[in-house]
Amino acid sequence: MTHEALCSMTARDLAQAIRDRRVTAVEVARAHLDRIEAVNGRLNAVVQIGPDALAQAHAADEALRHGSTAPLLGVPFTVKDWIETAGLICAAGDPARASYRPHEDAVVVARMRAAGAVLLGKTNVGQGAPVYARPNNPHDEALTPGGSSSGEAAIIAAGGSPLGLGSDSGGSIRWPAHCCGIAGLKPTTGLVPNTGHFPRIGHMSDPRTTIGPMARSVGDLAVALRVIAGADAGDPGSVPVPIGDPAEVRLETLRVGWYTATPGAVPTADTVATVERAARTLAGLGCTVEAVAPPRLEEALPITEAYWAGVQSASFDEWRPPRASVLAGEQIERARFEWERFTRDMLAFMRRYDVLLAPVAATPAPPHEGWGMEQYLYTLPYSLTGQPVVVVPFGRAEALPIGVQVVARPWQDAVALAVGEALEAAAAPASLPPPPLGR
């Protein structure tokens, strides 16, 4: 197979090709490393290359010869620089960590390796600064790839990696997936352990952030989720809940709500049309579909801003906040009250619906400068509620991709994935931008 063909394949197809011995893991890894070398000078997406990537791939080929049936055997993957990888620098955007090399993998990385996947390297976060150069969008380098799983989305969209791990606090998997035209999953909070994530995440101090997969296809998200999900003693907030099988979800039984309006956002006509087309598609597949107005959406941003105004400890072992809190005790308790009320009312609303469809953002990827919190107005609500959300690219505005959020009830990640796969399968080929391999 040509390098271009390998760099266009899904993780599932790569795994099958390796199992069928139509290609070796070494050939697959080399193709993606060459692709990274070709595009990364423009994208600044990958900030560390694993020096043993080809050795890992060779070990995968040897394991196959000895009968291994690992689900991701030989499949390359990349990891957001907030998720620790043994021996590779994990700067996490912090100059104080610019040369820090963890001794252990984050649990999700260890689980990917145990499933046979080959770690290619670490990817840029946010705007890159002050540690690395700014990452760029592969569809237009003058545009942001989104934040903060920025490099992860960019390198997957550019064909340099078929699969990756990001993290999402308020939209940090979902917005980059939308900006770059790939699939992403924010799992139900607690389904995937955060052990080994930096900044450190406590289940009480940060009940929003979760690690999740990013990929070229929704089906690959499901494969990766089965690998990385499951409780871990290092994260008391992780829960041993069965995932379910997206293939067993009967679309014709689902009740779907959709909306495009949210306070503070002015969605483009293309954004509105994309969500409406997704709703019509699901109706055509037998779902019961109706326009809805979820409750209290206007509260999501102020609740989030109140959460950010508090302080957390820089250490897991002793109380070391980096600054003083700007909130008094009653303000903190009121913010928690409003957060809980928001979640309670949203989940009560979800009793009527299996799935909600919504924009990811009001616009396609904006320029590097001049965007702000308005880009997260559609994603913040479901970080507060902890619900699973799949982003699937489903439209475009000229050359730029437009994603749709597929929101399910807590612990119903399989439903979100099933609907995402259905939308992906129904998307007109012309509506989805392919990886820009010809650049």
Image (spheres, helix red, strand yellow):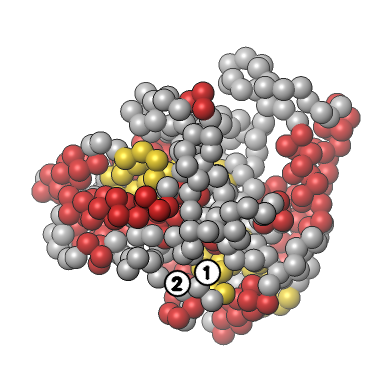
Could you say which quadrant of the image residue 353 lies in?
Answer: bottom right
Work out whether 436 lies above or below 301: below
**In the current view of this chain or complex, which residue is farthest to the top?**
318
**Closest to the observer: 84 or 117?**
84
Q: Earlier in the sequence, mark 2 or mark 1?
A: 1
Query: Which amino acid lies under the numbered mark 2 shown in the image of this protein?
Result: Pro
Residue 433, label in figure: 2
The answer, for residue 373, to whether it is visible in the render is yes
Query: Which amino acid lies under the numbered mark 1 shown in the image of this protein?
Result: Pro
If the image is split into quadrants, where does the N terminus sit?
Answer: bottom left
**Closest to the observer: 143 or 182?**
143
**In the current view of this chain or complex, which residue is farthest to the bottom?**
284
**Closest to the observer: 247 or 113?**
113
Label 1, on which residue?
Answer: 401
Left or right: 390 with respect to 54? right
Counting other residues with Cα less than 10 Å from the Cα at mark 2, is it few (<14), some (14-19), or many (20 or more)?
many
List x then y, in percent, for residue 161: 35, 54
